[in-house]
Image (cartoon, grey):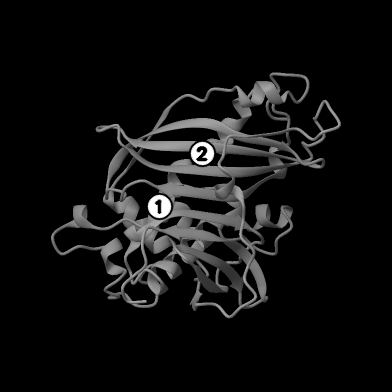
Amino acid sequence: MAGSGSSEFDPELVISHKFPESLYTYTERDAALYALGIGACAKDAIDDKELKYVYHQDGQEFIQVLPTFAALFSLGFTSEMEQIPGLQYDPRLLLHGQQYVEIYKPLPSHGCILNKVSIAGLHDKGKAAILEIEIVSYEKESDDPLCMNRLAIYLRGAGGFSKSSQPYSYSKNPSNQSAFPKIPKSQPFAVFEECTHASQALLYRLSGDYNPLHSDPMVAGIAGFSRPILHGLCTLGYAVRAIIKCICGGEQNMIKSISGRFLLHVYPGETLITEMWLAGLRVIYQVKVKDRNRAVLSGFVDLDRLSSSL
């Protein structure tokens, strides 16, 4: 069991835990590789709205960076959870349930990022515990805040730790960030269909998520899948690219925040259909796998303005 510093689940110890600050360094090559990993230019290598993520005629330092690249700054913090005192769970039963990202300024093409991490929430759901980890990322040189990630981690089998009849629940998040809008019954404002490649997970993992669930057939089989599955954050990247393309007119810096709830796995090679609804400056979206007609991801993206082309 992880978090064996205490003999039982102690929520007060968990929420008071202080993580060490950490650095994340990336180059233009990392930004371009990430863009290819979430399907940029896969349909059209000279797409003028996507080529900017992988190439610039004045040099690689001028390439643009997709907003979902910010999610990479949160990689690795689930392994840090094993250091949290009072947290009792089985790492094999851990699920990444939700991701929320706020973008404070356009991400530079390269950088050294300082991450400050805290516990943002802890909830007893009976059979499971939900732990929320918040990572605020700063440009190390200027100390300017760049973005914030919040992950909701489902710890199956770790619930039932409440000391009173009222289930334990702690959160420091504004309710408008954690509430998920219902998918509208009306026709979508826009629909975008795109096929992932059979090697998509092998390409995406080069951005830093080397979990063998996405590459090793034996590990995938033990987890109950017929073959390795696509990373949830890769599917989120596909969804946000679809929104940038269909609603933002290719302008990625219109995006202020991104929220995604992972509903079901995707197999590399499957076709993703992203459905989008406009509600003011909010885009509500849902991603379905065409091949199985199942919803795999849903959430919202908040914009700072609407595109003049709409």
Query: In this figure, which residue is indicated by the disc labeled 2?
Result: 76
Nearer to the camera, 94 or 245 = 245
State the residue at coordinates (39%, 67%).
244
Element marked by disc 1: helix
Query: In which quadrant of the rendered image does the N terminus lie?
Result: top right
State the residue at coordinates (47%, 49%).
101
Q: Extreme top residue here?
A: 6
Mark 2 and mark 1 residues within 8 Å of each other at the beta carbon: no
Query: In this figure, which residue is indicated by the disc labeled 1?
Result: 69
Q: Residue 241 appears at what percent x and percent y?
A: 42, 66
Task: Identify the mark at residue 31; answer none if there is no mark.
Answer: none
- Circle 1 packing at 10 Å, graded few (<14), some (14-19), many (20+), is some
Three-letter code, disc 2: Gly
Please, is residue 210 above or below residue 274 in the view?
A: above
Cα separation, mark 2 vs mark 1, equals: 15 Å
Q: Which badge, 2 or 1, is on the more N-terminal residue?
A: 1
Query: In which quadrant of the rendered image does the C terminus lie?
Result: bottom left
